Amino acid sequence: MNIARISYRTLLKTFNSPKSYINKYNYLGTSFSNHGSAVPLSTTKLRLKDEKVKLTFILHDGKRLETEANVGDTLLDVVVNNDLNIEGYGACEGTLTCSTCHVILKKKDYDKLPEEACEEERDMLDLAYGLTDTSRLGCQITLTKDMDGLEVTVPETINDARS
Amino acid sequence: MNFIKLVSIRNFSSSRNIPRVCIVGAGPAGFYAAMHITKNLPAVNVDIIEKLPVPFGLIRYGVAPDHPEVKNVINQFTKVAQQPNVNFYGNVTLGKDIRISQLRQHYDAVLLTYGAEEDKTLGIENEEADNIVAARRFVGWYNGLPSDKDLKIDLSGDTAAILGQGNVALDVARILLTPINELKSTDITDHALNALAESKIKEVYLIGRRGPLQVAFTIKELREQLKLSNCQTVWRNQDFEGVENMINDLPRPRKRLTELMLKSLNEYKSIPIHNDNKLFKPIFFRAPKKILVNSHKKITGIDLICNELQGNKLEEQKCVATANTEILNCSLAFRSIGYKCVKADDEIVFNSNGLVENSKGIVDNNSNTLAKLYVAGWLGTGPIGVILHTMGNAFQVAKVMCDDLKNKDCFTDKGGFEEIKKNYIKNSSPIVNWEGWERIDKYEIEQGKLRNKPREKVCSIEKMIDIAII
């Protein structure tokens, strides 16, 4: 049931949001300096989907949401598929048009990510509250086997200056 | 699991000990607040009332038709509305059908989220001349807002000027400059598509009174504009004097935005202008002084005051008018300098900024007999920011509401919408519930299919009601 749902989502994503795939492709095309970390193609993702990793979301109030996630899923997939209670997360459903899936990584994890943020991701991050040097959008982080035990912080979505 | 949850809610609602919350305005602020409240209170009834027969506010009527991804948030809002303890009551107008004091009498908490629906005016000579269009109305027109469907706009000239440099201004520019074939597959209304297909507009100016370092638009929207097919961007070199020296000290978002403008400026210098291309021309340091008109009172141009920045430090710089002026010839102009809130009900008190005065969303807490009044979204924060900012504010205010309601242990004598309907709005036009909206939604999608569009919006309130009420 769960697997069926995931592959359906992956499929949907392939058809509905070519944008993120194009961005990844662009990234491959423009930055040869980073060729050591190959970006997985979608076929790789499907093959690896039965592999699981542990993942923890730390909310701004300190609450920890620990979950098991499929390799090949994005952090946004994990939140949606596991019905994690993170309010408002992923408003645009992974199409790089909002920054509600903003997460902050530890420096060492951030540096290890196989893909750097593309321009469009940075554009959206620029609108996020509490932007840090290790901020990413959860919809753009695809889990790999070596991310087992990853912890990410979900910052608060409000800026007190506005209230 | 879901079934158990549902049953427990039903059980609760049969006792009267469950708080009733009324949210006025079914836009993003209202839905995000409803999302937080229903998630964080174990038992609650939330009624969302809306002036239009249809929900989603600016997601439906503000977000540009070529930004369908942004509208995906409707899926989250739909889940909120489909919960058994949430009701949608469309075609109910605050200030006309019901008063705030009546809502406060029949609910335990009332939240105002009806936004900012008017546009700010410039206050200059001939502003009411023919073919000066409020950007807000143009947006409403191409998005099918019933009150804007008959907007008069003449697109037969070759030059348009947009006064303002925010994201709405960029939306207007992009819709005017996008090749018509690319708009055909969006949910832009047929009347707008037909008019734009005949448009002769070739040049669009985007006029700001301040400089490149102060623009209000965001980087995503600019990048999109710069990438538009069959369109070239023409900057004024002199507007960028000294900008390059400042960028290293800017915070990251402003820095990246400025870098993108500089990059485009340098590209434009090296690429010759193609005759077939449309032109996007941002100009800075110009403020409108008056609209120039012909004998028919139709716009022929804008008299612009030349501004300059004074002060050394960026944050202290002020824009000051000089004695110089410049005339820009154009046959169409848009006013896009921001929205303002309206007093839907004369019981509402505005502060000097034209917003509902509040402290962490609490507006009025001084009555023993009436429910607490709250405000969230643009009506309380001012009409700025993207959906994320509205979301954050709505969650914050909703949290305050939840805390207040949790601290109150007894809820009695509140009749909610049933009481409102019985006492006040029984004779006015029909109320459209969520099922009614679903019928409109289905109809629009069907109509869209016939035209190879995601939907064709119904633009008449009467027709919406006809479809919704069976």
Image (cartoon, coloured by chain):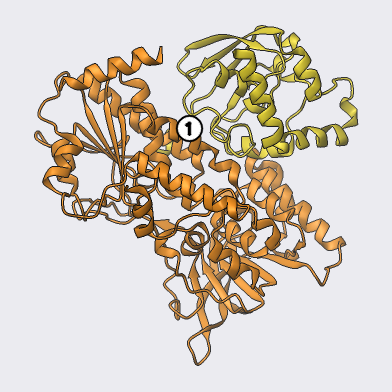
Chain colours: A yellow, B orange
| Image quarter in which the N terminus of chain B is found | top left
Give left or right: position of A44 versus B435: right
Mark 1 belongs to which subunit?
B
Give left or right: position of B14 versus B244: left
Dot 1 corresponds to which residue?
Answer: B76
| Residue B216 image offset from top left, x and y in percent | 56, 53
Q: Nearer the viewer, residue B67 or B261?
A: B67
Query: What's the amino acid at mark 1?
Result: Gln
User: Crowding near pointer 1: few (<14 within 10 Å), some, many (20+)?
Assistant: some
* Vertical side of B381 occupied by B1: above or below: above
Q: In which quarter of the image is residue B183?
A: bottom right
Q: Is residue B430 visible?
A: yes
| Residue B143 image offset from top left, x and y in percent | 51, 57
- Label 1's element? helix
Q: Nearer the viewer, residue B306 or B469?
A: B469
In the image, farthest residue toward the bottom: B295
Q: Can residue B366 be seen in this view?
A: no
Give left or right: position of A131 versus A47: left
